[in-house]
């Protein structure tokens, strides 16, 4: 079984429009066949609500639900609570309870979260990315309404808080006039040397803040040429050392 985010050509499986806008939907496949779909939303920056859990074939629902929850926590290790409405899934109550949900006003799962989200001023964030893809920026501008909508992964390098993901969201937040957003420190093993190299590229290009990065919104093609290809060249070179 393989779990992944729903791609553009799989959007027919999505029922909740928000899931497309926010990229909050996963799909489970086996032998290239879709066997389950999972959609969710953030009720708060550290609280998730399941909006849809649907299986299409005979399968181990316990395993699939647990895998979907693992996927949420992989992308959002700061989430402390996952909830769902009882009436939607009363027919498979035992599945939710088997993976750790408890009864209450809503079924609730207290997670073993690995990162703590913290408030941070946008001006104090140092980006390690040279450009922002225009399509992603435009999409972020559509749905970001408040600082709690923006939680980005960061690392500490010397005395700097360096963002390593979510740059389109950060630029959108800056353009909307937000003073702060939320961040969390990468909880796993991190290739700090790569991020240091990225910082050196950014310094050479004069990209030292999110305000600087907001002046470098480019097309998909330009983003690939200026940023993605450069990263790939770095890793290709490292493999030959």
Image (tube, rainbow, N blue to C red):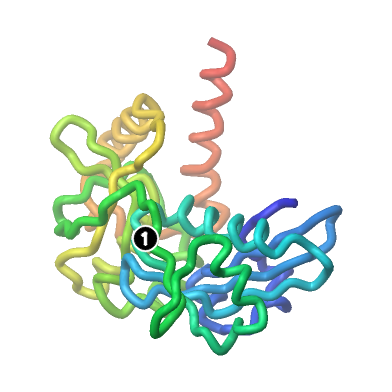
Residue 208 can be seen in this image: yes
Left or right: where 10 falls relative to 203: right
**Residue drawn at (57%, 69%), measured in percent from left and top?**
96
**Residue drawn at (30%, 31%), measured in percent from left and top?**
200
Q: Where is residue 62 in the image (x, y as percent from the top left)?
A: 65, 61
- Quarter-wise, where is residue 71 in the image? bottom right
- Quarter-wise, where is residue 123 in the image? bottom left
Query: Is 159 drawn above or below residue 180 in the view shown?
Result: above
Q: Position of residue 97 (x, y in %)?
A: 54, 68
Q: Is mark 1 on a helix, strand or loop?
A: loop
199 or 62, which lies in front?
62
Left or right: where 220 falls relative to 144: right
**Residue drawn at (30%, 54%), measured in percent from left and top?**
213
For mark 1, what is the residue?
Answer: 79
Residue sitting at the far top: 241
Q: Position of residue 114 (x, y in %)?
A: 35, 47
Q: Position of residue 202 (x, y in %)?
A: 31, 39
């Amino acid at each position: 079984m393989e779990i992944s985010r729903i791609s553009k050509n799989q959007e027919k499986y999505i029922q909740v429009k928000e899931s497309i806008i926010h990229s909050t939907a996963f799909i489970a496949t086996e032998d290239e066949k879709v066997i389950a779909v999972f959609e969710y939303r953030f009720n708060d920056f550290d609280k998730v609500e399941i909006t849809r859990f649907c299986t299409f074939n005979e399968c181990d629902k316990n395993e699939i639900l647990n895998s979907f929850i693992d996927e949420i926590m992989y992308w959002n290790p700061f989430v402390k609570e996952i909830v769902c409405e009882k009436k939607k899934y009363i027919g498979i109550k035992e599945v939710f309870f088997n993976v750790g949900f408890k009864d209450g006003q809503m079924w609730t799962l207290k997670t073993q979260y690995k990162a703590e989200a913290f408030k941070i001023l946008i001006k104090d964030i140092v980006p390690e990315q040279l450009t922002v893809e225009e399509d992603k920026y435009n999409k972020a501008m559509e749905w970001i309404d408040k600082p709690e909508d923006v939680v980005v992964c960061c690392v500490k390098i010397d005395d700097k808080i360096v963002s390593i993901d979510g740059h389109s969201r950060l630029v959108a937040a800056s353009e909307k006039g937000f003073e702060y957003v939320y961040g969390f420190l990468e909880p796993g093993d991190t290739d700090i040397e790569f991020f240091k190299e990225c910082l050196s590229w950014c310094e050479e290009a004069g990209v030292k803040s999110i305000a600087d990065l907001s002046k470098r919104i480019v097309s998909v093609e330009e983003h690939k040429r200026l940023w993605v290809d450069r990263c790939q060249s770095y890793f290709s070179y490292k493999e030959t050392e």
